[in-house]
Image: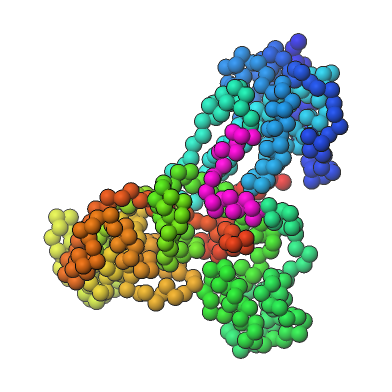
Amino acid sequence: MKIKLLLVGLIFGMIGISCKDEPKLEGIEERNEVEEIKELTSQDDIEDYFEDIDSTSTKLNNFKSVNSFYKQREFMPLWNDKEAREDLFRSIETIEYDGLFFEDYHGEELQQLLSSLNSENEEQNLRAEILLTDAFIDLAHDLAVGKLNPKEIYEIWGTELNTVNIESLLQKLEKGEKASSILAELAPGHVVYKSLKKALKNYRDDGIKENSSTVIASGKLVKPGENNDRVPDIASRLFELGYYTKSPDSVGTRYTKELQTALEDFQKDHGLNTDGVIGNTTIENLNLTTEDRYHQILVNMERWRWYPRDLGEHYIIVNIPDYELYVVKNGDTIRSHKTMVGTEARKTPVFSDEIDYIIYNPTWTIPPTIMKNDVIPGASRDVGYLRKKNIKIYDRSGQEVNPSSVNWSSSSPRSYTYRQPAGPSNPLGLVKIIYPNEYMIYLHDTPSKSLFEKNARAQSSGCVRVENVLDLAKYLIEDQKEYDDEKIDEILKSGKTTQIAMKQEIKVHHFYWTTYQKKDTTRFIDDIYDLDKKLWDLLKPKA
């Protein structure tokens, strides 16, 4: 029986149904029993469907893949079994617990189609067959790879994209494997992703809408003891968030010690400078609502789908906005270090690489960005700048160049290499840990150790400064017994630049996540590079 184009066109029109406008239908497993459909659709009907319908009019997300799949199996239907259909639909119904959206997987149309299957409506049954396959392909892709492509969104994203073999997954379906089992294996298995799922469920169960929330206006800095008209609003917002326990109605315009303590607790919990000063970054974080925080969980789950699935048995994670480095071995975090990362203007990139070697008493070869933006302009204004900074210039043959002989107004300064020798003023300190990468980024020491006392530590030019990095370096080469404490002390005291190759295989992963669960509490971190809102605007369902 050939499908009439007019009838098929009517079926396509059903997509406009929305749960935002109509009461949500019951889940298909709870519907009134209908007569079992032994054959959802026929081989001939599926073949006619793809012969007669133009890809632009089907409203399928994966027309070519679906067409190819059915052609390969000679247009035999896949979803005749009721249990298989309902198993996949349950995955669609619950996909929001993975931070994705029911409506993106034909959820509303499938809900209606599968709730009213009967042997008399061949066109609707055919539509259900095709949509189920299309939805499975989208679900598999989005769980395994992510819904969006980070390289199209962020300039700082260098992690390789994940891949998924849809054909092999469809073959598993053909062999009778449950769709829900296949899909469950595709999502990230890392403990942070799993904790985000738990946090997301808690937010959904508790409700993400605030009955009321105070919005604080931006303005000049307010320091403890000062008076400001915004202080009552700040007290109200801290009260709403559970940081200030007294009645905000009694608060005047004076910024009191009690209010300062509450604000500092909030700042500490959100990775802000714990200085008690009311600045616009603190206000921006105070103004984020429960719904905003819910969206923050969603975007971080999407980012986790972009990260490598296999991080290795022994690796380092640098969580950029949390200013923390963790060493993980066989699933256990065995050490952690505070870090400093790149400023907003010189962001630390997201990428993964393996540690190659460690350098004690390192020289500092000025990276291109700093050379262009800082060193050359500084020398152009005052040739003595290089002497004050203890920076030497070398030409392409490795010969040292006299700064006075350089025409600083020409393009020639860009062709030189600028290097600072090892020593106490060297910004790399006593050691750097190298994992060769296109960004020329590495872990290193710093002479400015007091900066680790700050909560907000976006202070570097892109590389990652690590507190107690000598201890970390010692750990990384502890399998090389010849480099004991006495030998390392000897190297450091000599002042001689010394390179030690790694023997252990340890990767470094630069990741960016701004929320996670800690002891059943969802912790939110300041989004230091303002990446979350941009991602949410792209990720959220289109109106």
Magenta stretch, overall SS: helix
**Position of the N terminus by quadrant:** top right
**Which residue is nearer to you in this view: 408 or 95?**
95
Asked if residue 273 lies left or right of residue 133, the reply is left
Q: How many marks?
A: 0
- Residue drawn 27% across and 68% down? 430
Question: Can residue 220 be seen here?
Answer: no
Q: Is residue 477 left or right of residue 246?
A: left
Q: Position of residue 124 (x, y in %)?
A: 78, 24
Question: Please, is residue 182 above or below residue 232 in the view?
Answer: above
Q: Is residue 165 above or below residue 509?
A: above
Give yes or no for residue 335 being in the magenta stretch: no
Q: Does 181 appear in magenta?
A: yes
Asked if residue 387 lies left or right of residue 435, the reply is left
Quarter of the image for residue 84 reads: top right
Q: Position of residue 222 (x, y in %)?
A: 60, 82
Q: Residue at x 18, y 68 (%)?
A: 490
Q: Is residue 411 left or right of residue 255?
A: left
The spot of residue 112 in percent (x, y) is 80, 33
Observer-nearest of 184 and 95: 184
Q: Nearer the viewer, residue 318 or 36?
A: 36
Give the residue furthest to the front. Answer: 481
Image point (57%, 26%), residue name: 172
Picture residue at 56% right of the left edge, 38% below the top: 185
Q: In the current view of this chain or complex, which residue is farthest to the right?
A: 32
Magenta range? 180-200
